[in-house]
Image (tube, rainbow, N blue to C red):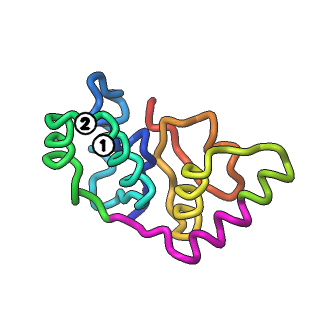
Amino acid sequence: MRYLLDTSVFSQPLRRKPVEACLLRWKEAGDADCGVSIVTIAEVEFGLALEDAPRRREKYRALLENRLTVLPADEAVWHTFARAKARQQRTGQTVADLDLLIAATASLRQLTVATLNTADFPRIEGVAWEDWSV
């Protein structure tokens, strides 16, 4: 595995107008080189529950559920998250906690975050990331 897909990438197949460059990049990388954090699964499932659209839920089951290896937010991830969050608080460069958890997961496992979120991931120290919108 080389890449950890963040929610902005993983959810693309569910979008009405997906970013084609992102879907192509995922296809080129291949599912065997991609994984997701349990945080991403939770974010997608939260969105589906909130939306309560049976057809989108079915699309999720058909296209994404159980497709990739899901990495846990285990004790080591939480320790890495805590140090990163403290560092961000000191520097004033805060990002959303869930993005920071995804970054901590990638950092611990020496994976590159595949993202469309080019505003936040560059501000997280110690995480490799790629913009899959291009």
How much space separates mark 2 and mark 1, taking CA atoms?
5 Å
Q: Is residue 38 above or below residue 16?
A: below
Q: Residues within 10 Å of mark 1 (few under 14, many from 20)?
A: few
| Residue 72 among magenta residues | yes
Q: Residues within 10 Å of mark 2 (few under 14, many from 20)?
A: few
Q: How many marks?
A: 2
Residue that label 2 marks:
52
What's the magenta region? 70-84
> In the image shown, does 103 or 2 lie closer to the viewer?
103
| Residue 116 among magenta residues | no
Residue that label 1 marks:
49
Mark 2, secondary structure of its residue = loop
Q: At which x and y percent is residue 86?
A: 78, 59
- Quadrant showing the N terminus: bottom left
Q: Is 121 left, or right, of 32 in this rendering? A: right
Amino acid type, mark 1 = Ala
- Quadrant showing the C terminus: top left
The residue lying at 80 percent from left, 51 percent from top is: 89
Q: Is 62 left, or right, of 39 in this rendering? A: left
The residue lying at 17 percent from left, 49 percent from top is: 61
Quadrant of the rendered image containing residue 110 = bottom right
Q: At which x and y percent is residue 109?
A: 52, 69
> In the image shown, does 56 or 130 lie closer to the viewer?
56
Residue at the top extreme, as displayed? 17
Residue at the right extreme, as displayed? 90
The residue lying at 51 percent from left, 55 percent from top is: 112
